[in-house]
Amino acid sequence: MWGVALVLVAVLVVKISHWFYRWANPKCDGELPPGSMGLPIIGETIEFFSPHKLYDIPPFIRKRMTRYGDLFKTSLVGQKVVVSTDPEVNYNIFQQENKSFLIWYTESFIEILGQESLLKYHGKVHKYLKNLILQLVSPESLRVKLLPEMNEATRRHLQSWAELGAVDVKDVASDMIFEYFSRKLISYDEKKNKMKLRENYTAFIEGLISFPLNIPGTKFHACIQGRNTAIKVIKEIYEQRKASNKPGNDFLDHMLEEVAREDTILNEAIAVDLIFVLLFATYETTSAAITLLTKYIFDHPKVVEELTKEHEAIIRNRKDENSDMTWEEYKSMTFTHMVINETVRLANIVPGIFRKVVKDVKIKGYTIPAGWVMMVVPSVLHLNADKYEDPLAFNPWRWEGQELHAGSKTFMAFGGGVRLCVGADFAKLQMTVFLHYFVTKYRWSVTKGGTVIRKPGLVFPDGLHIEIAEKKAAEVN
């Protein structure tokens, strides 16, 4: 009896030991990069997802770079991953998009963003959807259609901030961008709609980076519910517009025309998911960038002084000093673009970019098997002391004489390759419009907050409160 039990225990121990060994030493037709796979299934997920408040390379990454170098293996959420912090490797990964690598997200993340979202598609379908979006945010569309609305919305909202006297920058910037961009997308007015789209987006965002446990009471469940309700609102607007056949002079009109074409790739499900993701990506990331921008320039009065000098000079050169900012003025704002580049370099709003390996690839003498995932870490590139002197310092002057309107192997704040962020020009324009009126028309100071909480995938500026008031006539120009 005891002999049989001991044999069974021994067999179990051998099987578990073999399982641990196979997990720690994955199969590979070659040599894998150094690293640790952590515990079976769990891998190193818990440490990876730990939030931190550093304006620096994530501790998870830094610790392993020190131990293993700029290429190392790990396991996250059950997926075998190789992390790259090498500029040349990262550049080549983006250049091999749709060949050796495909964009990748966890199943739970795709569930949240939608099975028909832009993130799911590759090749010709992705290119088609990207071109649709460019109808809305191309440089020409920004110049002719969106800039006038940005000017109006930004001026009006800054005025309302001053009337309140004190505001949370992230909250009010989110409200501003959500209001006018949802109107531009689907002619949505929060005040006139009983099902509050903004509230459901808030629930969605709060659970976006959370443990994927879909039971009532969890953030993930609230996130899914928020998404479902937001999709319901967008779908109702879509169906009402389709039935009425009355134009709304917005992006939805264009979507309906595309769906109605006989040779189209687009269908209703893809169109609704596209609108959902566009609204989220536009207002959430841009409002985060504006919040961090406000914090950075407040901490550096000389930057505010130089910005004010540049923008007031532009105002003095106008025939009408009260007229709106123009596209030509925007393109001429050299120091402003330097400030924006420095902001997004330090902010690292998207700290990790994932690509799935579709066939075995050789990288720096190592073999990365098909099915594994490559993770590119832009923050390591942006905080590289060999490229950026004193990399943790906010110093817009480091961009003097540099290319200000394109990415590079060591600057990929908006991604790279065919997946370069289609909304990058929108974000930069909105930040510039905000700065233009903010530094020329208002006095302000930070009264609370400014902490940045980082989680893999997103940055959460934490409660940046400012006091704000209009400048008196003697202070302007």
Image (cartoon, rainbow, N blue to C red):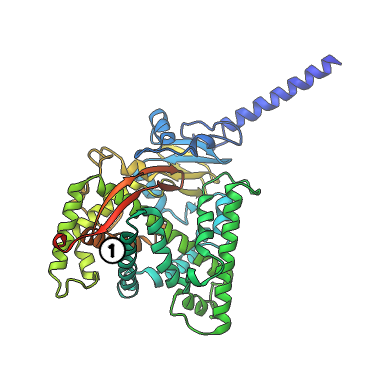
Residue for point 17% across, 48% down: 302
**Quadrant in which the C terminus is drawn:** bottom left
Residue shown at 30% from the left, 47% from the top: 446
* Residue at horizontal 48 percent and vertical 72 percent from the top: 188
Q: Is residue 397 visible?
A: no
Name above or below for residue 156 compared with residue 46.
below
Q: Residue furthest top?
A: 2
Q: Nearer the viewer, residue 313 or 68?
A: 313
Residue occupying the far right of the picture: 1
Q: Indicate the position of residue 423 as horizontal and vertical percent values.
A: 38, 62
Determine the residue located farthest toward the bottom in the rendered image. Answer: 245
State the image coordinates of residue 427 (x, y, percent, origin top left): 35, 60
Depth check: give the residue in front, 425 or 200. 200
User: So how many labels did they put on this image?
Assistant: 1
Q: Amino acid at mark 1?
A: Val
* Residue 298 seen by the camera: yes
Q: Residue 421 in the image: x percent, y percent?
A: 39, 59
- Is 383 on the left-hand or right-hand side of 282? left
Which residue is under mark 1? 433
Rendered view: 189 above or below 261: above
Mark 1, secondary structure of its residue: helix
Task: Using the image, determine if residue 476 lies above or below residue 347.
Answer: below
Work out which quarter of the rendered image holds the N terminus and state it: top right
What residue do we see at 48% from left, 78% from top?
Answer: 253
The quadrant in which residue 23 appears is top right
> How far from the left and from the top, in percent, is residue 321?
17, 71
How busy is the neighbourhood of tag 1: few (under 14 within 10 Å), some, or many (20 plus)? many
